Amino acid sequence: MKDTLILDTNYFDTINHDHRDPNPWLALYLDNSIPINDTTKKALLADNDSKSVRFLQPIISFFSKLLMFAIHVLKFFFPRSFNSPKILHRILSWGMKNFLSPHANLLIFRHFHVGSEILQFIAGNIEGLEMKTSPIKPIDFNCVKENIFLDHDLNLYNFAIKLNKNLKEKDLQIGRAKKLNLSMISEDQFNHIEFPNRWSNILDLRSAIELFTPFYQFFLTSNDFVRASNSLQLDETIAIYAAKILGTPAHLSLVNNKHPMVPASTFGAAYNLVLHGLAAETLHEILVQTKLDQAENNILYPKD
């Protein structure tokens, strides 16, 4: 692949500290109060500091909301029309490859890996429960064409349903694990995939999501789109599962998408999706650090 780029890890080393005009993203990068993978942190903050955020995002966001309202009216009368996840994911794959910045692409690809490992961690750390998950771990843009965005949303709901059915049938409770199984948690920085870096690859993450959301709404049924939007609030549910297993509820304060029984408006889906990604990254980093602490103290759980 020509004109490709692995994340520039020296981005923040080139920013000079001006006491009269401090860079807010440099301040957040140097601050370590929020647990997050270092490569992800650099990608997210560099993405926030891009020209795309300053100049394109406000325009894209405005027109995206107008288009979403028009599609909402159309779908009210024809809720199951124009349903084609296959076409949707081909558009998403093409758009990601040709217009998203390397930072934005890395954050999206990494999210699927992180989310899959978190669900595997929960399923693998409940005593008396054996449950298989459906990991989604894309390695290139062709993987995107396999309905991975829709499947990601379905996985969350199917996981919650299967998990709680099994718990009720076997009269089990999620509790603190006596021996944590962290074999599924990857310490990989996920910077081995080279993403396109041509002149057209300029869109930041949130601008891309704002741009893609009307396509998502148009090519899915109303039920699929609303369910996908509401799935973001399952962040709180997944975080509670993990907190019970770890016995440390502190990371719940890092969750912003909450109250799944009181659904939020679909018009805020783009912003909430970025928060969803951040919540997954912080929880995953906590699991990574727990795994590293275990290794340092020779407390290793055998791999499956």
Image (cartoon, rainbow, N blue to C red):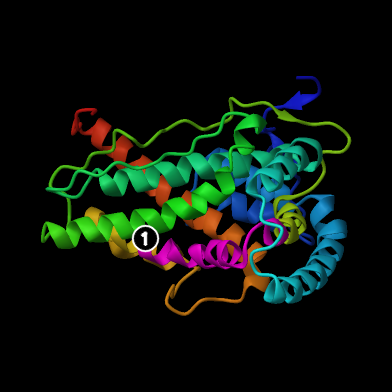
Q: Check disc 1 and report the residue beneath it.
A: 239
Q: Residue furthest top?
A: 1
What secondary structure is marked by label 1? helix
Q: Is residue 247 visible?
A: no
Count the marks: how many? 1
Residue 196 location, x and y as percent? 76, 30
The residue type indicated by label 1 comes to: Ala
The residue segment tinted magenta is 216-237
**Closer-to-camera residue (76/107):** 76
Q: Is residue 127 left or right of residue 181?
A: left
Residue 234: in magenta span: yes
Q: Quadrant of the C terminus?
A: top left
- Image point 50% across, 49% down: which residue? 152
Residue 55 location, x and y as percent? 88, 58
Q: Is residue 70 left or right of residue 258?
A: right
Q: Is residue 131 visible?
A: yes
- Image point 10% across, 61% down: which residue? 171
Q: Is residue 123 above or below residue 143?
A: below
Q: Quadrant of residue 213?
A: bottom right
- Image point 14% across, 48% down: which residue? 127
Q: Quadrant of the N terminus?
A: top right
Mark 1 closeness class: few <14, some 14–19, many ≥20 residues within 10 Å: many
- Image point 81% across, 41% down: which residue? 99
Q: Is residue 33 above or below residue 185?
A: below
Main secondary structure of the magenta stretch? helix
Residue 207 location, x and y as percent? 76, 56
Q: Residue furthest bottom?
A: 262
**Closer-to-camera residue (178/261):** 261
Q: Quadrant of residue 76?
A: bottom right
Residue 225 location, x and y as percent? 60, 63
